[in-house]
Image (cartoon, rainbow, N blue to C red):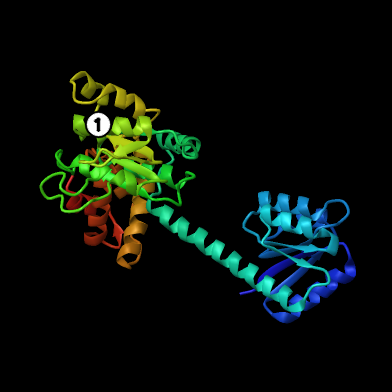
Amino acid sequence: MKSKILIIEDEAAIRRVLAKIISEENENYIVEEAEDGLVGIDMITKSDYDLVLCDIKMPKMDGVEVLERIKVLKPEIPMVMISGHGDLDTAVNTMRLGAFDYISKPPDLNRLLNTVRNALDRKELVVENKLLKKKVSKKYEMIGESEAINHIKSMVEKVAPTDARVLITGPNGTGKELVAHWLHEKSERTKAPMVEVNCAAIPSELIESELFGHVKGSFTGANKDRAGKFEAANGGTIFLDEIGDMSLSAQAKVLRALQENRIARVGSDRDIKVDVRVIAATNKDLQKEISEGKFREDLYHRLAVILINVPALNDRRDDIPLLIEFFANQIAQEQGTAVKIFSEEAVKLLQDYDWTGNIRELRNVVERLIILGEKVVSENDIKLFANK
């Protein structure tokens, strides 16, 4: 695979020597030249480069300004600065601004080529990591172009970079957990863990231990000290799914954790400081739960800084064709089979059904039709196998 390298240097003799040395080192290196910073910026804007070598002292635009501009335009490109003897302090400062490395004039041949190789390896790793992250993100992609879904996407873009707490509401199977994952992946906490807790699946007598941990001997079966989910999520995000099912006792402790950024393990009086973003979700009407004394109003107001409601599938039927296509491709990839097409009549029939189980139910039906239906899933296949 060929690597495209740009040399920005106002002294023609030095520029040509660098280009000759680098291009002769490896036949896969394509070297281009720019006589000053303005020309270099223009070339980078119009084309993709794997590496840029840039002189520091140049007319029109110096190397530091070129570095700053490129870090805005195309931050993934590694920049190696070329410094004269009097520019060493500046060269060191460029490292703080994001330069990969610097080389001094006249360049040491081995150092120059090693730096080029290392910078290109770094670029390749950055690209691979971005591709991997895109693959991970696809798992939690929210499919749809309806007004409701576009509104949610817009809210996520605005809210995710902040630490604001978010309460996600909506019926079962609508994709509330996808919204939670989007919020985490687009946040500044994305490198730290996102810990999920299904509050409805944990017995009420164990929920506090699950969330906050416990010390040995604090209750029957507590044979050793154990950290809870809040500690596991430190620095990242905790997703409290079905928070409407949490006991009032646990709610009180969650409220304290949100107020003070501290938790205490069950059976311990020692506080542990935690830095956790809280995202919660529920399919219940929490205002109704509050009026019935089943949910704390003060906790609700702590959680609901931002409210995101995920609509039922019946309220966004225009998205069903996109969802069918997405699930058909996803299932084919999982099963290692060819992608099946759904006829227009089949799609129209599925759009007209009453989806009480929402997106989760639709995916199950699509999978069933892919397994049992013909190569092109027809209206007849829907009537035979959709079980609607």
User: Which residue is at a point 56% across and 62% down the rendered structure image?
Assistant: 126
| Mark 1 nearby-residue class (10 Å; few <14, some 14–19, many ≥20) | many
Q: Single out the residue that lies furthest toward the front.
A: 269
Observer-nearest of 152 and 81: 81
The location of residue 383, given as percent across then percent down, is: 20, 49
Q: Quadrant of residue 18?
A: bottom right
Name which residue type carries label 1.
Gln
Asked which quadrant contains residue 11, the reply is: bottom right
Q: Residue at x 46, y 46 (%)?
A: 189
Q: Position of residue 291 (x, y in %)?
A: 21, 18
The secondary element bearing badge 1 is classed as helix
- Locate the N terminus and report the quarter of the image it occupies: bottom right
On screen, 107 above or below 101?
A: below
In this rendering, position of residue 131 left or right of residue 300:
right
Q: Residue sitting at 45 percent across and 36 percent down? A: 163
Relative to 111, say whether 45 is above or below.
above
Please indicate whether residue 166 sits to the left or right of residue 296 in the image.
Answer: right
Towards the viewer: 42 or 125: 125
What residue did someone put label 1 on?
Answer: 251
Q: Position of residue 242 (x, y in %)?
A: 25, 37
